[in-house]
Image (cartoon, helix red, strand yellow):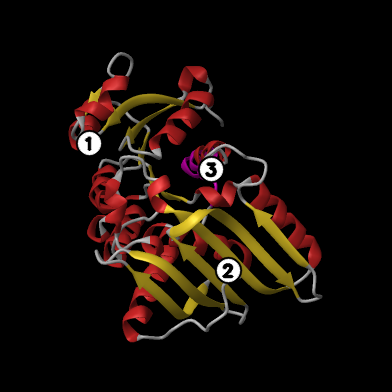
Amino acid sequence: MTPTAGNARKVAVVGLGTISKYYLDAVRHDPGWTLAAVCDIRSAALAPHRSDTPCFRDHRTMFQEVALDAVVVTAPNDVHAPVCRDALRAGLPVCVEKPLAVSLDDGRELAALADATGTPLFTAFHRRYNENVLRLADQVRRGGAIEKLTVRYNELIEDHIGADNWYLDPLRCGGGCVADNGPNAFDLVRMFVGDVTVAAASVRRDQRGTDRRAVIELRSATGIPATVELDWSYDGEIKDVDILLSGGTRFQADMLAGHPGFKSSLWHEYAGILGDFAATISGVPREDGGLPALDLVAQTYRIERAGVLAPEGQAR
């Protein structure tokens, strides 16, 4: 049963950085949710909420003092694991912004804890709710077998992070474009062809050790090839999916088309996340892609260290 305004689920948001406004807007417009508290270690980030929402600088204190039905974690990547761990131990369903964690071991621990406690752990991949991607999925279902798939995720990262400079710290981010944008791209590949493994990877880093560009070659269990192109130094923004079917038909989804404002596609995508999170809490079966995406990040970095390069000329 979908909650009404009288029994809406009480949710807290942990982390009030660049992405939090999309979650907060989705909560505000969905009658099935009510914002019960916010948490951030920065007083300045809490200031806009102090007049109407309980504010906390420590999530554990918030879990103890506020009656909650769920928590959204959109703190920096390196904080995902400890906050999710505490929420799961408190019996709170968790929606965590991708990546699930910065290390595969932490991700596995969280998944095991969610299973052991019977508490939903939901990783948010906003691009799977993009209206153009969903239209593409329908076209492909009606069009035939996939022969080749390419996902491009190119942007100048400094234009997108606002004051969240932790993205550029490889320890806090978990790496760079592979660790942060990679999960979204990998999730889209898995959405169309199922489980995949990394066959080859070419990764370029800056002087800080942050990976700024990568081309990753994937293979599905049935042998379908897929290419993921990531670029944090691109002058502009390209986010698209290109699919070649066995009969020669090609379909493409431009994730930004129809949303001309900067990052304007995110509003409807995060509304989709919140709806899917609610369904998961209600018991709708769903395979969470957080751990598989994190595994692909780990595979990419492992192959990078081994020097297995992606073939030249794969990126479109």
Q: Is residue 249 magenta?
A: no
Q: How many marks can you see? A: 3
Image location (x, y in percent) of residue 5: 51, 19
Query: Is label 2 in a helix, a strand or a loop?
Result: loop
Query: Is label 1 in a helix, a strand or a loop?
Result: helix
- Residue 276 tag number: 3
Q: CA–CA distance between discs 1 and 3?
A: 24 Å
Image location (x, y in percent) of residue 61: 18, 32
Q: Earlier in the sequence, mark 2 or mark 1?
A: 1
Q: Mark 2 and 1 residues: CB-CB less than 8 Å, in contact?
A: no
SS majority, magenta: helix
Please state which amino acid type lies under the numbered disc 2.
Gly
Residue denoted by label 2 = 194
Image location (x, y in percent) of residue 216: 48, 74
Q: CA–CA distance between discs 2 and 3?
A: 19 Å
Residue denoted by label 1 = 59
Please state which amino acid type lies under the numbered disc 3.
Asp
Q: Earlier in the sequence, mark 1 or mark 3?
A: 1
In this rendering, position of residue 238 left or right of residue 40: right
